[in-house]
Image (cartoon, rainbow, N blue to C red):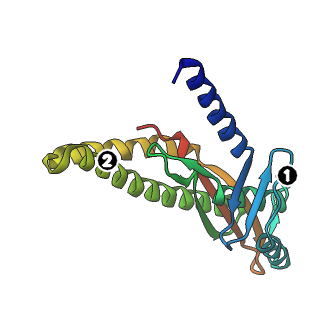
Amino acid sequence: MSMMKKFIVLLLLVTSAANSFAMVSFESSSGQGVALFQNQEPQLSKDSKKMIKRLKKEGWLVIAGEKSMEQQILQSQLCDVEQMVDKDGSSTNRYVCHTSVQTAGTFNTAYAAARTNALVELASILKTDLVAAVESQLSNEQGSDMSATTKSKFSQQARSVVDATIKSAIPVLVIYRKLPNNFFEVQVRLAYDMKKIKL
């Protein structure tokens, strides 16, 4: 094949790949497919709309000046379904999410406790996933000759990466309600972008 023919074939492949990425397909946890086109806004799923109605009926509110409950639920829904391609070329979840609900005498105390609990759980999930991925990668690369010291070294490196970056977890949902005993119940959902992890 001449150089010009190779260039044309490569150009056609790139063009067809770009066209196939013009539509991104997300699948919600209920199995409903939601298609997002470049010029179309994402929509709440039926399950999310029902959940919003239930939450409002139960007295849940958003913090004044923050995004509406619908916007926060939509952001949370998108974090659950957004995919990315990992370094092996397979599709995986882009965000790791965790929700925590805490009750306290003041809003600030309940919020701090819920956020801290969600961060601790996210860190635990990330450490487990990273350590397993690093150990698997090292086992594949070095076979059975890998020493326990090497495994431990890379496990510690993965843990320090998570510890250093977990602070960039973003709150995608913060709602609260005042209980009959004048205590506040706060629900915080945090998402962590896996693209931020650099090993």
Q: Quadrant of residue 17?
A: top right
Residue at 45% of width from left, 54% of height from top? 126
Q: Is 71 situated above or below 20?
A: below
Residue at 65% of width from left, 59% of height from top? 81
Q: Secondary structure at mark 1?
A: loop
Label 2: few (<14), some (14–19) or many (≥20) C-alpha neighbours in 10 Å: few
Q: Is 57 situated above or below 121?
A: below
Between 67 and 40, the residue placed more toward the observer is 40
Q: Residue furthest top?
A: 3
The quadrant of the rendering that contains the C terminus is top left
Between 125 and 41, the residue placed more toward the observer is 41
The amino acid type of the residue labelled 1 equals: Glu
Give the label on residue 58, or none.
Answer: none
Residue 193 visible in rendering: no
Q: Quadrant of residue 112?
A: bottom right
Label 1: few (<14), some (14–19) or many (≥20) C-alpha neighbours in 10 Å: few
Q: Earlier in the sequence, mark 2 or mark 1?
A: 1
Q: CA distance from mark 2 to mark 1?
A: 39 Å
Give x and y (percent) for residue 61. 82, 66
Residue at 83% of width from left, 60% of height from top? 43
Give x and y (percent) for residue 47. 77, 74
In the image, taking residue 137 as reference, residue 72 lies left or right, namely: right
In the image, taking residue 48 as reference, residue 29 lies left or right, namely: left
Q: Determine which residue is flagged by label 2.
A: 137
In the image, taking residue 129 as reference, residue 69 lies left or right, namely: right
Give x and y (percent) for residue 5. 59, 24
Q: Determine which residue is flagged by label 1.
A: 41
Give x and y (percent) for residue 167. 55, 44
The amino acid type of the residue labelled 2 equals: Gln
